[in-house]
Amino acid sequence: MEPVTSSSTTPAKPARPRPSPADAVVTAIEEVVVGWPDDDPPITVAVTGWDTGGRPDIAGSLAERFPARSHVICSFDAVDWEGDARPPGALLARGVARAAGRRRNRLRRAFQPISVEMSSPSTRRRRKVLAGVVSAFIAAGVVVLPDVRAAVFSLAGKGGPIGELASQAVRSPVVAAVLLALVFWVVLGRAWTATTAVARFAASVRDEATKGTFEEVRDQLAKLVRQALRARRHGRRFVVVVRNIDSCGGDFVLELCETAKKIVRAPGVVLVFLGDLRTVEEAAVRKTGLPVESAHARRLGRRHVRKLIPNVVPLPHATTDEVWER
């Protein structure tokens, strides 16, 4: 009878899944967003160097990591912006204003909405209907009181077609109600908007830049961001992610970064650019006017880009220290 040999084998421990480079970058940015001091200025981060598995959805991962009501996460695709006829700075200001406007409380959205030109089509329809209903109620209230009706239409003046129409409105409640409803509808549709300067800037950014209204747009965006973050209670942040910058022309992205440096300067803002910076640096080198082969021109170009984006997180070895690297 052959002896029985027993061999005890230790079961292999399950291998821990290695975090992907995208997870490392999301973790680093998450630590910066959560642990960022309240008195620090806005921070601009660029995430460069993609892994072989494809481009990670860092914006979506950030939205999953953060609670829905703690931070404001908005993501934009630079490729879509490049195909637009408007300048990149105008598109960025419009996108930030719309994202901040959606997170303000209902009272501010009702009595101090963003401009109609910057709203979605559904929001425009709702606002027109609401303005019409409110105008009808106000006009009805004025028409009910004859003395008030006469005082209101006496402001229209006497004589001429306007005076004749005003005198008919004083005698006829129906005409008065229609005229007052139209006047109030126009006034309510244009007054008390929170983004007048931003809308004007988005419509003609280069003309507004020559007039020196960057400061006005910056202050208005800062006010919207502050309202969206509820005065930054509980350390809330406003994270703006612009992805696929290396899929666009360098001149386009350089103009976007330069404009963002001037207008998106509100406390609590974290601006994240996703993509390689080489095309932007090449555009900065060309902007110097020196020969592109010159080492001095390349240094100036890189220095200019680093001033615009001082914090760079390279994949796949991203750590919190690299985010804070100046």
Image (cartoon, rainbow, N blue to C red):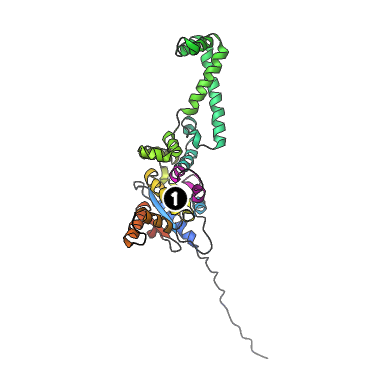
Above or below, 151 against 24 in this view is: above
Furthest toward the bottom, the residue is 1
Give the quarter of the image for residue 262: top left
What is the tally of numbered marks visible in this picture? 1
Which residue is under mark 1? 252
- 12 and 304: which is toward the camera: 304
User: Which quadrant would the C terminus be assigned to in this image?
Assistant: bottom left
x 56%, y 32%: residue: 126
Q: Quadrant of residue 232?
A: top left
Q: Which residues are magenta?
A: 67-92
The answer to whether residue 81 is visible is yes
Above or below: residue 20 compared with residue 85: below
- Residue 88 in the image, given as x and y percentages of width and height: 45, 46
- Of 181 and 144, nearer the camera is 181
Q: Residue furthest left?
A: 296
**Residue 252 lies in the magenta stretch:** no
Question: As shown in the figure, which amino acid type bears the numbered disc 1?
Answer: Phe
Point out residue 307 in the picture as x, y percentages from the top left corner.
34, 53
Is 86 placed above or below 19 here?
Answer: above
Q: Residue at x 66, y 90 (%)?
A: 2
Tag 1: Cα neighbours inside 10 Å, few (<14), some, or many (≥20)?
A: some
Which quarter of the image is occupied by the N terminus? bottom right
Label 1: which secondary element: helix
Q: Is residue 81 left or right of residue 294?
A: right
- Indicate yes or no whether the magenta region holds residue 91: yes
The residue sitting at 59% across, 82% down in the picture is: 7
Residue 270 visible to the viewer: no
**Percent of width and height locating residue 206:** 40, 41
